[in-house]
Every structure is written in C-alpha cells, then in structure tokens.
Image: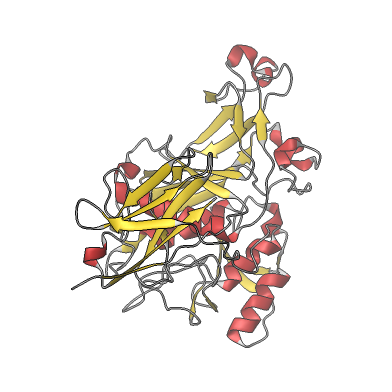
Amino acid sequence: MKSVVIFMIALVPLKGIEIKVDYRYDSQGFFDNPAAKVVIEAAAARWSRIVNQTLLHVDMKDEELFDGRFEIIHPGTGKKHVLSAAASKESDFYFKVGQPAADEYLGGFSLDKNIWILYVGGRNLGGAGRGAPIGGARNLAEIYADPESFLNRGFNLGVSSLTVIGGTVSFDLDRNWSFGFLQPEGGTALDFYSIALHEIGHCLGLNARSVAEFHDLIKEDRFVGDNAVTALEIDASKEVVGLEIVKSSEDYHWRDGEYQSKIFPLGTPLYFGTVGAGNLQDLLMEPVFNVGEDVTRLEITNVDAAALTDIGWSVISEDPPRGPDLHLEIGASNNGGFVLRLMSEVGARYTVQTSPDSFSWVSVIPSFVGDGGPLSWSDGQEGTYDPFGPASSLAHKYYRVIKD
C-alpha cells in the first residue's frame, strides 16, 4: 500500500514529572528484548504526560549521622533490597548503631528536579506483574513525615507514605506477552502496554496497600475519594457510594467488572486496540485484564486519573498549549525515506514522535540533545527505534517534534 505521509510539526512544552525507567536490577534479562524496553518507556511517558506535579531535587549523602536509606522490592528476585547513601558499612550510621547492613551502598544518591525513578525487571510471578512504591527503611519513616524534609520534594505534607522517589515493577518471565503498538495481538497474548500502565499506577500509589493516602480513603471497603466518585458518576450517569475495593495480600483493586469509565483523553492516550475515544472501558486498576474480540488494550480511565488526584498528585486538566512551530527542513534520506532537520539550541532536548492516525503518538527512542548545531533524523535511522516502523509499512504516517 502506498504510504501517505503528513508532517505535523509542533513545539509542545513538557511539564511535571518525568518517570525515568532504570534497568539496573533486571537481573533476569527481561528487558534484553528491545520491544519490551520501548513499551515500558511508552507507558512511563503516558503517566509522565498526565502527572504535572513538580518535585524538588533529591541529594542524599554519606552523612556522619542519619545516612539516607530506602527500600525497594528487587525486580529480578522479589526480595527486599535496602539501599543506603553511605559509602560502606564502615561509614553507615545505622549499621554502627546495630541495624542490619544495607544490601547496597551507593556513596550518595541524587535525583534531578521532577525526576521520578522506576526500577524494572522480570522474574517468575503468580500474576502478570507486580508494582510497588519505593518505601522507607526504618529511618525514612520520620523523614517522610517531616514536611520540611527535602525527601518530601516540596510535595508530601506529612502523611508519610506517598512515594515521591519512585517505584519498582516486575513482570512475569513466562507470560505470552504482546509487545505491539499498532495491533495488540489479543487471544492468548497479553498486551504489555496495558499491564505496564497498571503496575506503574500501583507505584504512584493507586490501589497500593502500603500507601496511607489511598487506604485512608477506604470506608467499609469502598474508596470514597471525591474526585474518583465524581468521575465515575459522570461517566456512568448514576450515583454511587464509593468504589468497592477488593483486597489481597499484595494490593487493592477496584472490584472486577463492576465499573466502567471513559479513557482519560488528555496526555495523548494510545487508542489502538482500546474501546476508543468517548467509549466506556473497564477501569485500569481492576485485578483482571478483561478484554476480548476487538478490544485488546486498556488505557488510563477518567476514574483512575481522578483517584490519583484524591491521593495527592496533581493531574493535568488540559493538554499543554501548542507553541510556535519549529523551523524544520524536510528532505529525502539516502534510503528513499524522509529526513527531518532543524537547528538546535544548546542543552534543549528534541523528541521525534510518530503516529499512524494523528491521535496515538509514540516517541522515537532516543531523544536528541541540542549542541547549537544542526540535528537530523531519518525514518528508519540506524540506532533509533520507532515503534510504528517506517512510513512504507503504513497507510498514513504523521510526525511531530517536541522540544523540552
């Protein structure tokens, strides 16, 4: 089929958190598959476009007293893994006063402003995935509860549990995963994008057993957050008394098959395989992936996004405005495709995004950092990955460039 290519060039300001995916604990090699890596990055970017909370810089150092510690569930083993900002046991204040040694000594730990870290990996699980917030390791409970602490990053006002550092996710090694973007396989294959969205939601505190901000809004096994209830009543056109919660030993979920909501339309959802814009789907944070026939993917719903605001996060209420167009040159590449060229600014980051329908956008990986000189990208360029593939494989293909 002959490809029809339309270029849409936009400068779209990015704001809020950036979920940075970190693969250092992928000891089983789940993300050696580049397709899996691209999909988890896309799911993280989807949440990043929705959460417009700002977070202060984190800088833990090897202190004489009160070395920073935090605890993760190791994505590759499932075991608790304590990290310390101390350089070693010898300089670890907590070890010297009788606590167990940390599992890993970092010699300092820092996160840039607005960066929220997501450790990912694969292991054998009973379910498809397991996501959890990063928690405190004894000493951090009081630090999180102190609204003046830098660890609260100017955000958490003292409830003590809503994670502001990041989360950890493991995916089942033996699952029949579908890593496609344009056509989720369906059948016995499980859409990795949908499950990744769900597990990152747990990491952000949604339906998370360890997060006080969430379980404090549960009354008689119903979540009564005002925003989530209102969103459900609007989409379902009926009054409800909270959303019924199903509790497990690991997490909370909305009762399976009980509620439906529309896909949250802001932040460029990925509509392929879903019920489509303006239609009702099961809530993302249900325990069972109920799809079939033409519906092979779940997206973030209005209710899921509203529950995020109930537990304290700030969520976008409108898409970022389109800024002035970038000055791009469009030409032919050596392989017969298209090439985009622009003059960059020093330190600015440029991300090429592509779409087969001008609604469902994905980012070409990696982004480019400007040095004040010319930048270029060609369709199918070696060393970059475009989840939708070259224009020649599509009936239509749209492009845009985002400058951050």
Residue drawn at 34 percent across, 50 percent down = 377
Q: Nearer the viewer, residue 58 or 339?
A: 339
The total of numbered circles placed on residues is 0
Query: Relative to residue 261, is residue 27 drawn left or right?
Result: left
As drawn, the residue found furthest toward the top would be 90
Residue drawn at 33 percent across, 38 percent down = 28
Q: Nearer the viewer, residue 350 or 225?
A: 350
Residue drawn at 53 percent across, 48 percent down = 19
* Residue 125 in sight from this viewpoint: no
Query: Relative to residue 254, is residue 7 drawn left or right?
Result: left
Query: Relative to residue 272, is residue 300 drawn left or right?
Result: right
Q: Nearer the viewer, residue 395 or 232?
A: 395
Above or below, 253 against 175 in this view is below
Q: Position of residue 220 (x, y in %)?
A: 70, 69
Above or below, 238 against 119 in this view is below
Above or below, 60 against 191 in this view is above
Q: Position of residue 336 (x, y in %)?
A: 20, 57
* Residue 40 in sight from this viewpoint: yes
What color scheme is it?
secondary structure
Q: Position of residue 257 (x, y in %)?
A: 49, 76
Q: Position of residue 75 (x, y in %)?
A: 44, 41
Residue drawn at 58 percent across, 55 percent down = 14
Quadrant for residue 398, please give it.
Answer: bottom left
Above or below, 237 against 399 in this view is below
Q: Tell me the quadrant of the picture where the N terminus can be found.
A: bottom left
Q: Nearer the viewer, residue 151 or 346?
A: 346
